[in-house]
Amino acid sequence: VQLQAFRGALVQAGGSLRLSCPAYGRTLSRDSMGWFRQAPGKEREFVAGISRSGSSTYYADSVKGRFTISRDTAKNTVYLQMNSLKPEDTAVYYCASSDKPYVGIRYYANPAEYAYWGQGTLVTVSS
């Protein structure tokens, strides 16, 4: 089982970037999915989550209104569209999946609830 996240980049503040997380060996339509990030010297933090059906999404307050999580069942891929990027968004971003049908942000926001993790993608936002 492997989750990949790529297309990390260096972008200017105010710019946009889309992260992709295709899965190999898993059917993501059965999974609750999340995106996390970890900045240098800081703990991993929740960014966004999406339910199995895609009908429910959850966001950290710091990214609400700027980031959008989505999933494409046919491509077995989860995305994170990031707009209006700020220097404080600089971090390694990780996608994660769980085969449990979570309801509510307290589950999506807890890294311990996820069994599978992507390798991480560095996103650097310059001021």
Image (cartoon, helix red, strand yellow):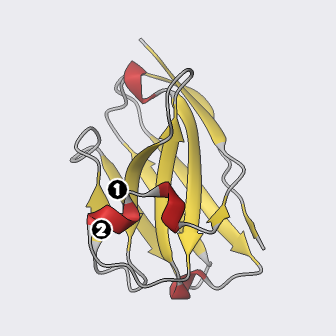
Q: Residue at x 31, y 33 (%)?
A: 84
Callout 1: SS: strand
Q: Residue at x 57, y 22 (%)?
A: 40
Rendering coords of residue 86 (x, y %) = 36, 24
Q: Residue at x 53, y 86 (%)?
A: 29
Rendering coords of residue 109 (x, y %) = 38, 57
Q: What's the amino acid at mark 1?
A: Thr
Rendering coords of residue 81 (x, y %) = 42, 51
- Does residue 79 appear in this view? no
Left or right: 15 as drawn, with respect to 30: left
| Above/below status of 8 relative to 36 | above
Neighbour tally class for label 1: few under 14, some 14-19, many 20 plus, Cα within 10 Å: many
Q: Tell me the tag on residue 108.
A: none
Residue 78 vs residue 1, the one in the foreground: 1
Q: Quarter-wise, where is residue 118 in the image?
A: bottom right
Residue 58 vs residue 105, the one in the foreground: 105
Marks 2 and 1 sit apart, C-alpha to C-alpha, by 9 Å
Neighbour tally class for label 2: few under 14, some 14-19, many 20 plus, Cα within 10 Å: many
- Does residue 52 appear in this view? yes
Which mark sits nearer the N-terminus, 2 or 1?
Answer: 2
Badge 2 vs badge 1, beta-carbon distance below 8 Å: yes
Q: What's the amino acid at mark 2?
A: Thr
| Above/below status of 73 relative to 79 | below
Q: Residue furthest front?
A: 112
Q: Quarter-wise, where is residue 53 in the image?
A: bottom left
In this figure, which residue is indicated by the disc labeled 2?
A: 57
Callout 2: SS: strand
Residue 27 vs residue 107, the one in the foreground: 107
Q: In what quadrant of the picture does the N terminus appear?
A: bottom right
In this figure, which residue is indicated by the disc labeled 1?
A: 68
Left or right: 82 as drawn, with respect to 105: right
